Image: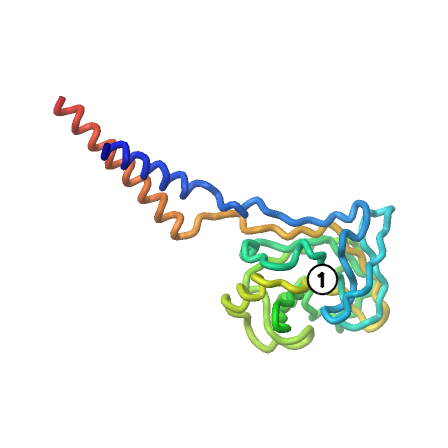
Amino acid sequence: MRHTFLASIASLVIAGGLAPAAHAAAMITSTFDTGAEGWKFGSPDFRNQTPDWDPATQSLTKSSGVAAWGYLASDAYLGDKSDYIGGTFSFDFASATLDPRYLNRPFLVLHGANNKTIYADWGPTPTRDLSRFTFDLTAANFYKGTTTEVAGPVSTAEFAAIMSNLKVIEIFADWSGNVDSTRLDNVAMAANTGVPEPATWALMIMGFGLTGALIRQRRGVLARA
C-alpha cells in the first residue's frame, strides 16, 4: 500500500537522522592502573624506551634530557582514526623542570604516513602540578613546520590524510634545556560527539515532511468519510 510504504520510508528517514553515528560514543583511554599499557618514550625514529610506571600514583614518569622526545601512544591510538576527526585528545601532565625559553612548543604531535608530521598550536604549557590538557582534533588546531617553527596551516584534506593512517602520537616532554622529569596520566582520545551534520538534518527534515503529508492526507480521507 502506498500509505504504508510512505509511512515506512518516513520512519526510516527519521530514524536514520536521529540515530547517532556508530562512533559517537567511541573513546580510547589509558589510565595506567597496572602499567605502561603499551606506551613508549622517545621519538618517531626511536621508540625503544619504556616509561617508568609509578605504582603509588598509577601514572607514567620519565626523566630525559633528549631534545624533542616524549610519550608515544600505544597501538590502540594508531591506524585509521578518521572517526575521531572533530573529537578531542586529553591527558594529565606535569613537568618538574620548566624553562621559559621552551614555552613555545607543541604539546601534541601527530605523525602520519610518508613522514607527514603536524604539530598542535602553541598555547597550553605544563606546570609542576598535574594538570588536564585537551586538544581539539581539527585541522585548525595544528600547523606544519617543526617543534620551534611554524611553516604554515594544515588543510582539512591534509589533516584527514594523517588521521586516516596515524603512525605515531607524541605527547611532548621536552620543556627545558636540562633533564626533564615528567608525569603522564589519564589519556583519552574521544570521537566526535555526533552533532548532526547538514546531510543528516536534511534527512530528518524530509522524514518529518513525509510524516506531515501522511497526516494531512489521512485527515482528508476521514473528512470525506
Q: Residue furthest front?
A: 1
Which residue is painted at 80% across and 70% down in the image? 176
In the rendered image, residue 6, in percent from the top left (x then y), is placed at: 27, 37
Q: Is residue 63 left or right of residue 5?
A: right
Q: Is residue 45 above or below residue 81?
A: below
Q: Residues within 10 Å of mark 1 (few under 14, many from 20)?
A: many
Q: How is the image coloured?
A: rainbow
Secondary structure under badge 1?
strand
In the rendered image, residue 108, in percent from the top left (x then y), is placed at: 67, 63
Q: Residue furthest left?
A: 224
Number of disc labels: 1
Q: Nearer the viewer, residue 156 or 178?
A: 156
Which residue is painted at 17% across and 29% down in the image? 220
In the rendered image, residue 136, in percent from the top left (x then y), is placed at: 59, 57
Q: Nearer the viewer, residue 95 or 169?
A: 169
Q: Residue furthest top?
A: 225
Residue 18 figure quarter: top left
Q: Is residue 69 above or below residue 184?
A: below
Q: Is residue 64 above or below residue 89?
A: below
Question: Can you say which quadrant of the picture contains the N terminus?
Answer: top left
Q: Is residue 52 left or right of residue 22?
A: right
Q: Is residue 60 left or right of residue 74?
A: right
Q: Which residue is mark 1?
A: 171
Which residue is painted at 67% across and 51% down in the image? 188
In the rendered image, residue 166, in percent from the top left (x then y), is placed at: 62, 63
Residue 41 figure quarter: bottom right
Q: Amino acid at mark 1?
A: Ile
Question: Can you say which quadrant of the picture contains the C terminus?
Answer: top left
